[in-house]
């Protein structure tokens, strides 16, 4: 497994453990389609939470991975979410939340940051 893949998996597992403790149930992990991959999709009380995880060893120039969440990535993510919704019609009536999780990798002692993304305007037909 490539080093970056291992780091990403570690970050996803950290986020997943935290969200499960908060009552979220995993629906999909590393789900992919032609538009890209959804790191985590979780469900709780008629709500869907899509989490894009960025794991980094240091803050660096990309601010813990924040700058990697550019317009192109946002467009691919929007399309991937639409594709996921089209293939999972059971969740069509759930409200949808999208969160960017910035996960510092060890040995960093920084805390995980959550950034709610409000303006993607996602439709299953996209």
Image (cartoon, rainbow, N blue to C red):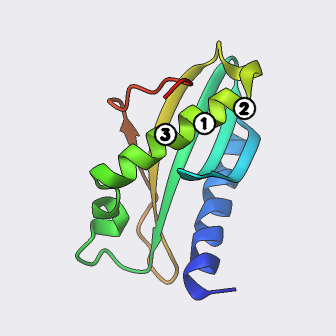
The quadrant holding residue 73 is bottom left
Which element carries disc 3, helix, strand or loop? helix
**Which residue is at a point 70% across and 35% down the rendered structure image?**
24
124 over 60 or under it: above or below: above
Taking 21 as reference, is 69 left or right? left
- Dots 3, 2 in contact, CB < 8 A: no
The Cα atoms of the two marked residues, 1 and 2, are separated by 6 Å
Q: Which residue does the numbered mark 2 point to in the structure image?
A: 87
**Which residue is at a point 55% across and 81% down the rendered structure image?**
4
Which element carries disc 1, helix, strand or loop? helix
Instruction: List x then y, in percent, for residue 104.
Output: 45, 70
- Dots 1, 2 in contact, CB < 8 A: yes
Instruction: List x then y, in percent, for residue 75.
Output: 38, 44
The quadrant holding residue 66 is bottom left
Which element carries disc 2, helix, strand or loop? helix
Taking 125 as reference, is 64 left or right? left
Q: Which mark is residue 4?
A: none
- Dots 1, 3 in contact, CB < 8 A: yes
The Cα atoms of the two marked residues, 3 and 2, are separated by 12 Å
Q: Which residue does the numbered mark 3 point to in the structure image?
A: 79
The quadrant in which the N terminus is found is bottom right
The Cα atoms of the two marked residues, 1 and 3, are separated by 6 Å
For label 2, the crowd category at 10 Å Cα-Cα, with few meaning under 14, some 14 to 19 and many 20 or more, is: few
Q: Which residue does the numbered mark 1 point to in the structure image?
A: 83
Taking 92 as reference, is 100 left or right? left
Instruction: List x then y, in percent, for residue 81.
Output: 55, 37
93 over 24 or under it: above or below: above
**Which residue is at a point 50% across and 30% down the rendered structure image?**
97
Residue sitting nearer the eye, 15 or 51:
51
6 over 115 or under it: above or below: below
């Amino acid at each position: 497994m490539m080093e970056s893949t291992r780091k990403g998996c570690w970050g996803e597992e950290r986020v997943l453990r935290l969200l499960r403790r908060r009552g979220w149930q995993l629906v999909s992990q590393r789900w992919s389609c032609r538009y890209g991959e959804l790191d985590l999709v979780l469900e709780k009380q008629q709500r869907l939470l899509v989490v894009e995880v960025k794991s980094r060893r240091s803050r660096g120039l990309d601010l813990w991975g924040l700058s990697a969440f550019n317009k192109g990535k946002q467009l691919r993510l929007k399309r991937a979410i639409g594709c996921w919704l089209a293939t999972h019609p059971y969740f069509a009536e759930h409200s949808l939340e999208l969160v960017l999780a910035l996960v510092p990798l060890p040995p960093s002692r920084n805390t995980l940051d959550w950034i709610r993304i409000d303006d993607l305007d996602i439709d299953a037909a996209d």
